[in-house]
Structures are given as structure tokens and as C-alpha cells.
Amino acid sequence: MKFSENWLRSWVNPALDAQALADTLTMAGLEVEALESVAPPFTGVVVGEILSVTPHPQADRLNCLKVNVGHGEVLDIVCGAPQVVPGMKAPCARVGAQLPGGLHIRLAKVRGVESSGMMCSEKELGLAETSSGLMVLADDAPPGVDLREWLDMDDRLFTLKLTPNRADCLSLRGVAREVAALVGMPSRGPEVQPVVCSPLPAPTISILDTEACPLYLGRALLLEHPDQPTPGWMVRRLERSGLRSRSLVVDVTNYVLLELGQPMHAFDSRTLKGGLQVRWAREGESIKLLNEQDISLQADLLVIADESGPVALAGIMGGLSSAVGKGTREVFLECAFFAPGAVAGRSRRLGVTSDAAYRFERGVDFGNARQAMERATALLLELCGGRAGEVIEVRYPMPDRHPVRVRAERVNRVLGLSLEMDRMAELLSRLGCKVDRHLPGGLEVTPPEYRFDLAMEEDFIEEVARLEGYDRIPAKAPSGPQAMRPAPEKEVAEEEVARWWAQRDYQEVVTYSFVDPEDEQRLSDAPSQLKLMNPIAATLSHMRSTLAVGLINTLCFNVSRKQERVRLFELGRCFHPDGLGGYIQEKRLGGLVYGLVEPEQWSGAKAPADFHDLKGDLEAALAGRPVSFRRGAHPALHPGRSAQVLMGDLVIGWLGELHPALLAHYDLPRAPLMFELALESLLHRSKPVFRGVSRFQPVRRDMAVVVDERVAAEEMLTALRSAGIPGVQEVILFDVYQGEGLEPGKKSIAFRIVMQDTERTMTESELEAGVKSLLGVLQQHFDARLR
């Protein structure tokens, strides 16, 4: 929101200079992003009227001017600007004037002709970077008047960086209301009186969706001189607020938008066919907007339509076919309230930006529409003459403003203050709230129509803090009993999990929970169906069901910037249906490895990371838990290089190498390895149990068996380790063989068995019995035979 300081002070004029006013607004939550002067400093420049123009006797490109500078004084000035004509009014720097850049105007001779000043362009006054001639002033500019005074150049511009909840401050009236509340003084705007009405034909108005548009006002106008130029004071206020002057009718609607915060639109009445309807668009309809953009309408777009079809996008922009021009006399003014939900997100989706949409999607004061209509009508009749018809108003139930109980004790407890209830009531009343002081221990506060952000007790506590002043809240050190919280050995904090992976040379990333649905289809085994109602972009329209999307996109970003080794992990939520119509927000751990196992160095081989490197990291992370791996398919992974991760019989995740087809799609030189686990599986572990160190030597026995080639070695290891054979401390797989000496379809698997007793030396018979028992387990479950 950008506005002129002088315009604001015409509403409310506190005893604060510009900087103090900016500080007050910023401390109240309305951040002043910029405070700048309208024009750079200069002195001695007045309005000059050119009386005559004669060629310079010694130069073809110079002219000798006689310039009226007021009070009967006429100056001779030599000027080289093109297109200088008698009667023209332009800035004149008199002798002694100081211009931007340190230029000092002196009496001088130019090619033998005395020049008593200088005619100025906008560039020479520091108002523009380039200019093609003199700065042309309005015909009503009085000669001799100081230019800074005439054009109000000692004004300053405020630029507010408003948060989305403060739509009420998107107008001069709203900012003035806020300043008045902060300094405790009244705000006075222009008095708006209903105009005298005349009978004029006007279209009928009907609203087909009263929730999307509960209020619509229209008025027919017959203007006498619509081609009149917009007055300079209005042009300056518009331009200083960032809007260009277009035509008188359009400028007036924009002026009311800035002044009162109510978007308006003007139709050329001659182009309207029959009555107007506020309705949702129908299939096959289209419209060309004022910016000449053709839009194919969808069913969720609210439109204003006549019998021929849509003539405006409600709350966003009018149509080109019904636009007013500089000479349009028959005008139909529109002023309405559109619900934020009926407008929000549409302009962004269509690629159409407008001040109206920016305000409507945040909430517009629905109690302000009638006043805005009367203000715009009065300005138009004052500036170009004419007649106004009766206001046509179609009104349905408006949004309710529910009262909220605000407890005085809670306000003081939250803020750390000791305010009386009467003080709280006074502060909230300044905001336009209706305050009932008769509740025991608190207030019943009803927010005004223009404050959509005030809905619960905490909102009003914040308002009390803002108006009382954040700087008045005492800084107190927290006090209270402190106790050491227990840290059970069986539980692992998420921070500890993150530290562990960071110590393994992985970098933590945080990616969007919003993902591209096409990436979801490629990388998830259960693609998300949870679509956002109002996505920030088409490629971020679904809630993720897997962390793989964000990890792969982060990898592609790094690879495109010549990163050859990438190791990532992320802790984040994924979203899955719960089968009851809702969704589960499960926390998961995902990771990715790409490139070399170790950073490149002079003494080591450049070994690329493979499946077993990642599996080793997972085994280390899950150590002490009953974890196993088994072959498993995943749509995003290589069919022969992927596995499921199990804890007991429960599948807790997956790991593997990216599918070759996706490798080409994402334009990656080599395949990354990925994993994803349910985070809950890492947050619990078995309690450590002490076991004495044996004084006796361990004994190693090797056992090789022949089994069917389809038997998984992991299943055999699990069976051996869970057999519970006395004295068996460790079983390790150390060899797998297929080939000569074995039958087709068979393979040899060799295990190393470590046996040890902590109390005595094991006998040979005990050792043989242990090995025989293990062999029996393999024979029973896998039809194995000793090799």
C-alpha cells in the first residue's frame, strides 16, 4: 500500500513528523517499507508562462523567450528545448535557484544574448531520468507561484508492507483509522452526502449465488462532459499511489478504491443487453478482459453477465466489450461485496492481476459500499456534470460479526501487563469495536465490519498489545521450577536421529509437502490423491505421500550445478488416507546417495556408492533392532536392486536404486540410491543389557550348504540367528557360489559360526551338536544339504 503523507494528513493529522509517524505504524504491525520524498530538494523554481518565442540570432537551435514569472515581471531567457510555444506554462528557475545535482542558476550570456534564468524539464528537476522537452504544467497554473507549493512537492510517500490479514488498511481511510486509534484522536474524511437523483433507465440486477455475492449496488449516470481532463490534484494522488491516470470516469473509480478501499467498476450502459446477473460461469463461455486477455471461463469463476453473456469477471476485472471510454456519457456504476472464497486464487490461476482482486480475496468492508457509490457519484457530477439515477441495491444476509468474550485477567496474564478493564475497553473502542463492559471479569467485544481478522480472544489480546505499545510490555526474566526431564534409554529423539545421519556425511534438507502430481505418480507406490483447493502453483497441487519427490528434485538441482557427490536425508510428514475419509500424517525418514562413497582424495580409489553401501548405513542406523531385508518391488526402483525393510514381520520401508526409465526422465548421469523408513521405527530401541566378557576362547566353525537358487540368504540367516542354539554367539554369511560342481538351479551358501561359553570351555561334542542343530534348522526350513 503506497500513499501520500499529505493525503493521509487530510484525514488525520497527529503531532508527529513523517519519520515518527512511520515508526509508530511499524511498531503497531504496519511495517513502513519505504519513506521517500516526492521530489528532490530544489529552490527558486516558479511557474513560468511563455509570452513569446523568437529565434536566437546566433544559434539555430536556441530560442529567446519572454517569460511571465508573476507580479508583472517578465524575464528574458534563452532556451534550447524543442516544441516551445507561446502560452505554454513550464517551470522557470530564476537567478539564484538551486537545482538537484548542485546546479546554481546565475545571470549569464548565451551566444551574446543575456539569459535571466532557465526553463526546466523533469530531468533537470530530478523528477525523471530522461525527458524530451520542458515539463508542461496545467493551463490553470498561476505564473510566479512556487513550483513546490503548486505541485505539493514537499509531500512524502509511505509504502506499507501489509500482512494478508490487514486488508482493512488497503485504503487511506483504513490507514487513517489505524493512525487515529494509535494516537487517540478522531479521523475525519470527506463528508459524503447522497446526491439528488433523477429518473434514468437502468438494467435490472439479480444474484444467483447469494453466498458468493450477498450485496450488489448499481447506479445509472448520464454525464455531460465525460471527456474533461482529470484534475491535477486527483492525478497527483493517483500517481503517488502507483496508479496511472487513464480517463476521468476510470480515475474516479480508482480514486474511491484508494480512498475508501471499495473496488468499483463502470460499464458503458449502451453496450449492456437486458438485465445483469451475478452468477457462476457456464461451460463454453469466454470473455476478453480490459487488458485484452482472452479467458475461457470455468464453472468456478463468478461473472457479471447480461443477456449476451459475461461482461465482467466478478471481483477481478471488467470486460473490454463494455468498457467506458473518454467520451462515454451513459455509464452504469457497479459496487458490490464478493465473498473472499469466491475470488481467492482465481486471478493468480488466470494470470490476471488487479487491485480489485487483491482486496476482494482478503476481504472488503461490506458496510462501505453505499458510501463508496455516493462518493464516486458526487465526484463525477462535480467534475463533469450530469444526472444520476437511483441506487439499485440487491442485498442478502451479510457475514455475521459474532461477539467474543475477552477476559481481563487473561489479557494481563498473556501480555505481562496490569491494565484496567476500562483501559482495554477504550483501546478496543478506538478500533471501531462495539464493547459491552457488563460481563463479570471481562468484556464482550464485537468486531467492526471491516476487520475480518478479529474472530477469537487472542486476536483482541493482540490488538490491546498493539495499541498500548509493544515497547510498554515489561521485559521480565522467566521464573518457575525447573526439573530434569527423564530421558528413557528405550526412546530416541528425532534430533538424535538427524545428528546420526549428519555424522554419516548426509546433509539434511527440508522440501515442500506440496508436490507435482506427475512426480507422485512416478516415484510413489501409493500416489497421493489429496489435492489442494488453492495451490500456489500447478506443480505444487498435491500433498506428498513420499519424501522421494523432494529428494529427487533436490538432487536434480544439485547435479545441474555440477555437484558430483550428493548425500541427502529428510525428516518430514507424508499423507495417506486412513480408510475412514480422513488422512494420516505419518512422519518418515528418507535419504538419497549419489556419486562416490567417499569424497575424492589422492590416496583412495574412486568407488561409486552401490546398494550395499546404503544397506550398510541402514543396518548401522537400525542396530539393536530386529531388522531384516527381503527382495521387494517398488515402481520407482530398479527391479533387481530394491528391497523391503522389515522390523519383525512388519514392513517399515524400502531401499534401492532408481529405475532406469526414471534415470532418463530426470536426466541423471548415474543412478542414485534411495531409502525411506517410517520414522517411528527409529524412535524406539531395546534397553541395553549387560553381558560379561568371556574368559574363554571363541571357536569358529564353517558350514556350507546347497539350497535352491530361489532361497534368499537373508531368510536363512534369520532362521539361524533366531534358532536359540546354546553357545552360538554369531552367524555370518561369507560366501555364495553357483557354477561348476553344482546342479543347475542350485547354489552354495557358506556360513561362519562363532561359538563361545562365558563360564567354561566348550567341549568338541557340544560344538558338533551346535553345528548339527543349525544344519537341522536349514534342512527343515529350506531343504538344505551339507556340501
Image: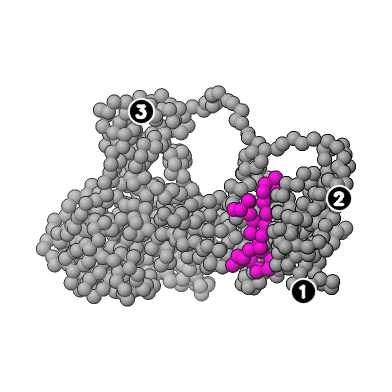
* Image quadrant in which you'd find residue 663: bottom right
* Mark 1 and mark 3: Cα distance apart in space: 86 Å
Q: From this viewpoint, is residue 112 visible?
A: no
Specify which label sits upstream in the sequence, 1 or 3.
Answer: 3
C-alpha distance separating marks 2 and 3: 78 Å
The residue beneath circle 3 is 408
Q: Amino acid at mark 1?
A: Pro
Q: Mark 2 vs mark 3: give the one in front.
A: 2
**Residue 251, position as x, y percentages in the image:** 32, 61
Asked if residue 102 is among those painted magenta in the image, a careful observer would answer: no
Residue 537 lies left or right of residue 766; in this view the side is left
Label 2 belongs to which residue?
A: 700
* Tag 2 near tag 1, CB within 8 Å: no
Question: Residues in magenta?
Answer: 621-650
Query: Which corner quadrant of the image does residue 358 belong to?
Result: bottom left
Residue type marked 2:
Arg
Residue corresponding to mark 1: 744
Q: Of all residues shown, which one is farthest toward the left?
A: 199
Q: Is residue 162 left or right of residue 226?
A: right
